[in-house]
Image (spheres, rainbow, N blue to C red):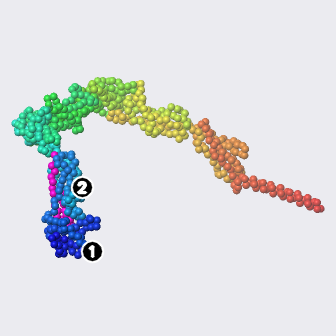
Amino acid sequence: MRYFPNLTTNQVFFNSSGSINTRQMEITGDLTSNNCSTRISDLTATHRDKYILRIENEGIKKTFCENLVIVTVVETAWAPTIDVSRSNLKERQSVTVSCSAYTPCVHSPPELTWNLKRDSIGEEFGKNYGTHFTRINNTIKLTYHHDGLNISCSARYPVKGRFKHSRESVRTLNVSYAPKRTAASIRPLSVVSVGNLVELICFSRANPPPTFAWFKIIEVDPVNDSSVYSMIFTETERGDYFCEASNDLGTERSNGICLDHIDFPVTLTINIPFGDLKEHQSITVTCSASTPCAFAPPELTWNLQQDSIRQLEGTTDGTFVSKLQETIILSDTHDGYNIRCFSKRSASGGNKTTETEVTLSVLYAPKDTSASISPSGLVSTGSWVELNCSSRAKPPPRFTWFRLSGGGAIELSEGQVYNFSVTTTQEGEYYCEATNEIGSEKSTGICIGISDALLTANINIPVDDLKEGQSVTISCSVSTPCPQIELTWNLKRDSLRHTEGNTDGTFTNKIQEIITLSDTHDGYNIRCSARYLVIGGIKTAETEVTLSVSYAPKDTSASISPSDSEPEGSWVELNCSSRAKPPPKITWFKTGRETIKKVSSDSIFKIKFTGGDEYYCLASNKLGKQKSSMISLKSQGGSGLGVWIFAIIGVLVMIAVGCAVFILDNYFTSSS
């Protein structure tokens, strides 16, 4: 109720029974537990007053006049407070940042939001005087990025279930850190002329602001102590520079920059080992350029491999040498090769380039050695021919001519050209050899053949009397002045081939095959062909041999004419045939139950037909013999077994009739 010295009912504006509630108030909690609160959900300026509490229970009233509650209403919400756990902030420190807001109603705390992590911890705390506040915390590890960071925190208070009356607080962090991102640059350009004004500029980010010092790379002491080093450029100022930025937290060095003279010549040098260069030799080729700067040496390129080794070496005079280096194994293709090296550096108005080149001189053994003949084509006896040898070598080669014979190579002449008149003894294969101090190489052969010389192929069979089952080696051979010849025949294509040298200087080319003879080889024609390739033409020869192979009887068979089923007593003709070499001897045999009987020595044998007889023939020669299948004679109308059965039955019938006649005769005799 509202406080007045003399209270009346009119001053009551809230009763927990609900009978009076003119100020929209609500009691929460449990009065019997001494824990209750009164909440005004929509506080306005009219609520500014003094309030007291009275308790009524069944006619008993207790008014707490000495415990006045004074409600003061302000126009705006309370601003949150941002606190940092340390006062002197430095990089790499861990600090706790908190945002707190006054909380008049613990059951309706304000909503806090800020621009730090969303997962910050939210808590509610009480103080000694009954005041409450809400707070959120976040622990961060400071870096130079946090310097100047604005931490903003907002508090929104709930009114009738909605949040309004928002207030925001901002706190800017001041973090000390060592110099960062220290960089050096030149204005206007790094390559200038003597007498130009040049400014070396050092930039760094630090808190507190850093001090600067400039150094020349070959000197110990600093040359300047400001962020901008201005100078009038002279020859002595050429070189590498860098700056250092420092404060009480640390020091950082910048990148190096090169200050050079635009008109100072860059001398390029290509270095190769001293002395004669020879093929197969491994050498290291180097292109180098002197520079006063290690940080910005000239850019070197050349026409050797792009992945060449790049090096930068210091010299005793304080300058540097930039190098490109490649190890190569020399060959004849490097002779006369131009190695070109290029240097490029930035300058006012564009790039300034320099180049140099060196031509390699490489010694190498003869290459591509070849021989030729004039005129080309088959020549006649007495014709004049000219052989010419060519080769590529350094130093130039000397030439030697050879003729290849069965006993080896015969040296004929020295010199690039060899002339002679062809005779039959000079047919053959010629080649030349080119030689210098590095090595030698032979040409391919030139086969010189006389057009009217005879070419003969021979087929050789080492055994005169060929028999089946024998293993024989058959060869076809041709003798020629040159070893290159093409032999073919109608035996296996993978036959053994080889060339033999003869004592007369010629060559015998052979094709050879081992075969096991059979009857199918008898009468087989072996044909062998030779193609002899000579300069300007082809000479051919062909021969043929027919094999004569002896073999034992094959396919022996017996036959009967007109047929093997004729009436008893008819004349039939037995015929025996067989394939053999030499021709076979024929013998006929008749077989009985226990004996075999020779009945004829002719291939055709006539007999009178008797049912049940069996015959076969035997063919034989000196290599073997073969028996035919059996011929069985059958009587017309039944077999031999049937005849015997009828004969036996007839005899039995005759015996039975005889016995019956004898018995009847005795009976009638005794009766009479």
Q: Going 20% across and 57% down the picture, which residue do you hit?
A: 100
Picture coordinates of residue 135, whole percent (x, y): 22, 57
**For this rendering, which residue is in front, 407 or 300?**
300
The image quarter containing residue 345 is top left
Tell me the quarter of the image containing the N terminus.
bottom left
Classify mark 2: helix, strand or loop. loop
The image quarter containing residue 643 is bottom right
Q: Which residue is mark 2?
A: 120
What amino acid type should be assigned to the residue bearing mark 2? Ser
**For this rendering, which residue is in front, 489 or 103?**
103
Picture coordinates of residue 369, whole percent (x, y): 29, 31
Q: Measured along the vertical axis of the image, is residue 440 above or below residue 245?
A: above
Mark 2 neighbour class, 10 Å CA radius: few under 14, some 14 to 19, many 20 or more: some
Rounded to the nearest whole Å, what is the CA distance between mark 1 and mark 2?
51 Å
Look at the image and say whether residue 614 sits in the magenta stretch: no
Picture coordinates of residue 230, whole percent (x, y): 6, 39
**For this rendering, which residue is in front, 599 or 95?**
95
Q: Measured along the vertical axis of the image, is residue 283 above or below residue 571?
A: above
Q: Which mark lies nearer to you, 1 or 2?
A: 1
Q: Are marks 1 and 2 in contact (CB under 8 Å)?
A: no
What amino acid type should be assigned to the residue bearing mark 1? Glu
Q: Earlier in the sequence, mark 1 or mark 2?
A: 1
Classify mark 1: helix, strand or loop. loop
On residue 58, the disc is 1
Look at the image and say whether residue 154 sits in the magenta stretch: yes
Q: Is residue 513 left or right of residue 629?
A: left
The answer to whether residue 395 is seen in the rendering is: yes
Q: Measured along the vertical axis of the image, is residue 274 above or below residue 585?
A: above
Task: Give the extent of the magenta segment.
Answer: 153-176
